[in-house]
Image (cartoon, grey):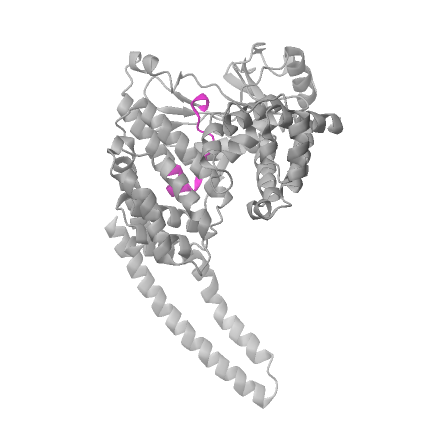
Amino acid sequence: MRALRFLRIVHTVGRFRLDEFLPSAGLRFAFGLGYFWAGRGRPRGERLRLALESLGPVFVKFGQLLSVRPDIIPEDIATELAHLQDNVPPFGWQEVIATLDRAYGRPVAEVFREIDAVPVASASVAQVHFALLPDGREAAVKVLRPGIREVIAQDVALLYVLADLGGRTSEGRRLRPREVIAEFEKTIGDELDLLREAANASQLRRNFADGRLLIVPEVYWDWCNHEVMVMERIDGIPVNATERLRAAGIDIPKLARDGVEIFFTQVFRDGFFHADMHPGNIFVAQDGRYCGVDFGIMGTLSDADKSYLATNFLAFFHRDYHRVATAHLEAGWVPPDARVDELESAIRSVCEPIFDRPLKEIYFGKLMLRIFEVSRRFRMEVQPQLVLLQKTLLQVEGLGRQLDPELDLRRTAQPILERWMNEQVGLRGLAKSLRDEAPAWARALPQLPRLAHRLLAEAPTTHRLEAGLERLAEAQRRQTRVLAAIVAMLALVVAGMFLR
C-alpha cells in the first residue's frame, strides 16, 4: 500500500511539473523526459497547491503549515498555499454508528436520546453531528474519521522519505526538513486525540469564565473518549455572514474590535490561544458575543515569549526599529554575532514603506511574516510556537478587516499590550511576583534552625565544630537578612495593592 501511495506521489510531482523543486539535476532530467507532455503554464505556487489538494487532507494540512513559514519557502508559494482549504466529503452514517458503538461499548441508541444522521460539519480528521443527551440537553458530537490514524501515519512516513531526499543539498540541510515534518507530525497527532481537544476546550472556557467576550461550549466529560468528543451545542451566526449579522442588529465594528481583544487577551494574559481561528470555527451569538469551536490546535507561550512579543509589537507601533532588532538578539533567536545596526536597517527597509500607508491598509500579521523573511539572512530560527501565532494573527486580522475595513489593530491592541507590560514590570509586577513566591518563602524560613542543628550534629571534631559554628553564624546572618527582605516585600505588596 505504501509503495502504491509513493508511486502516486511521484506521478503527481510529474503531472504538475514540480520536478523544478527537486535537488538533483538527474531527477529533474528524468521527470522532464517522462512528463514532457505536462506543461508549466501556471505559476509554480498554484501548481504546488493543486498537487497538494489532489494528494488528500494530510498533504493539504502540511501545505497550510508551510504557508506560514516564510523562513522556509518563498513568498509567492506561501501566498498561494494560504488558499488551501480543508474540504473533505463526510463519511457515511454506518461508519459513524460503528465508531460510536465501539467507543461506548454499547449501542448508540442507549447513549443518546437522538442523534442526527446528517453531519453539520466535516473535515479531514473528524465530523460533527447534533444530538440530544438522555437528560434532554442539546449537544454536538464530534466523531473521529475511521482509519484516519493509519492514513496519517502512512503519509507522514512518506513525507519523511521526501524530506531525506530534499535534505541532501546544502540548502535542504539549512531548511531542516525532518524537523519541519516532526513539527507537523506533532501538530496533526494532537488533533487525533479528542480527549486532548476536550481538555483544551475546558481550559479555554475557564480562562473566559466571565463570558463577557467569548462563549466556549461546556464539555460533557461523561460522553468523551479518544474517538468521540461531546460538548454543549452552540447556536450562532457564522462570523463571515456579515449580512445576517447586520440583520440581527450586531454592532459590526465592535465585533471586529472584540475579536482583536480576545486574541491578544489569550496570547498575553493566558499564554494559551486558539490557533485555528478561521471563519468556520467562529460564530456570533444573538447578543454579539463570539462563540468558538474546534479546539484541536492550541498554541502556548512562555513568559519569555510573551515578553518578546509584547516588546516587538509595542516597538512596531512606535516605529522603534532598534528595539525590534535588540529584542531579536535578547531572545536568542538571532545569533549573538549578528550586527544590531544591520538588522535594524533591514527591518526599517521592510516597515517604513508599510507605515507610510493609511492605517486601514497596514496588516501587522503580514508585517510579522515579512520581518521573519528578512531575518532569514541573519540566520534567525523561527520558533514553532511563533509559527502558530503568525498563522492565528493573520486569521484574526484578516477576519477583523473583513468585518470592518476601517479596523485599526494598533488602536485596539496597544492599550492591552501596555497594560500587560505594566503588570509585568515596575511595582505592580514586583508585588505580583512577591505574592506568587510568598508560599515558598513561608515554607523555607522555618527550616533554617533545623538545617543549622544538622550541621552541628555532623561535626564531631573541634575543627568541624568550629566550622559548623561559623556556618551557623552565617545562617543566622542570612536569616536576619531574609527577615528584613520579607518585611520589605510585605511593604511592597501592600503598596502594590494600593496601586491597583
Q: Residue at x 49, y 26 (%)?
A: 43
Q: Residue at x 59, y 79 (%)?
A: 457
Q: Quadrant of residue 372?
A: top left
Asked whether, in this view, residue 61 is left or right of residue 153, the answer is left
Camera-side residue of 126 and 33: 33
Residue 177 lies, with reference to residue 85, above or below; the image says: below
Q: Give the percent coordinates (x, y) of residue 302.
A: 45, 48
Q: Magenta region: which residues?
A: 265-281
Asked whether, in this view, residue 311 is left or right of residue 163, the answer is left
Q: Give the percent coordinates (x, y) of residue 293.
A: 47, 25
Residue 35 lies, with reference to residue 371, above or below; the image says: above
Q: Quadrant of residue 272?
A: top left
Say if the magenta span includes residue 268: yes
Asked whether, in this view, residue 204 is left or right of residue 411, the answer is right
Residue 452 lies, with reference to residue 385, above or below; the image says: below
Q: Residue at x 44, y 56 (%)?
A: 439
Residue 111 lies, with reference to residue 155, above or below; the image says: above
